[in-house]
Image (cartoon, helix red, strand yellow):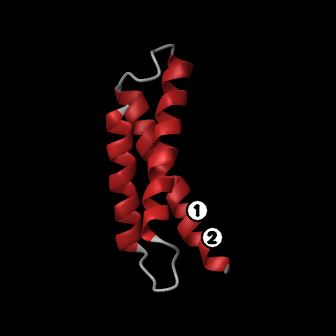
């Protein structure tokens, strides 16, 4: 589970660095969204595969990174740009 959290934090910081704008919301919010998306995606992937929720596998780690990156991209590109 810690790997999911670290991956989400890294992707949140990366999204913040790539799409920084003075009008963006709090940077902590961006990192928090990345962490939550990665943890939820990794846990759900483990549940679908029949593994313990906190175990680290290649599929669950990949899913956590991809989902976190997609959610951050959607939030940065669509939702937060509207306001």
Residue 62, quarter of picture: top left
Mark 2 near mark 1, Cβ–Cβ under 8 Å? yes
Residue position for label 1:
74
82 or 30: nearer the eye?
30
* Real-space CA distance between mark 2 and mark 1, rounded to the nearest whole angstrom: 5 Å
Left or right? Give the position of 27 relative to 77: left
Q: Quadrant of the C terminus?
A: bottom right
Q: Quadrant of the N terminus?
A: top left
The x, y position of residue 41, in whole percent, is 52, 37
What mark, if any, has residue 78 been given in the picture?
Answer: 2
Element at label 2: helix
55 or 45: nearer the eye?
55
The x, y position of residue 36, in whole percent, is 50, 46
Across the whole image, how many numbered discs are drawn on residues?
A: 2
Q: Residues within 10 Å of mark 2 (few under 14, many from 20)?
A: few
Q: Is residue 64 above or below residue 19?
A: above
């Amino acid at each position: 589970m810690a790997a999911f959290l670290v991956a989400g934090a890294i992707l949140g910081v990366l999204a913040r660095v790539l799409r920084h704008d003075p009008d963006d919301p709090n940077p902590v919010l961006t990192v928090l969204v990345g962490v939550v998306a990665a943890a939820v995606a990794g846990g759900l992937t483990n549940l679908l595969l029949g593994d313990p929720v906190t175990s680290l596998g290649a599929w669950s780690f990949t899913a956590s990174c991809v989902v976190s990156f997609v959610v951050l991209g959607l939030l940065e590109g669509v939702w937060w740009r509207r306001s």
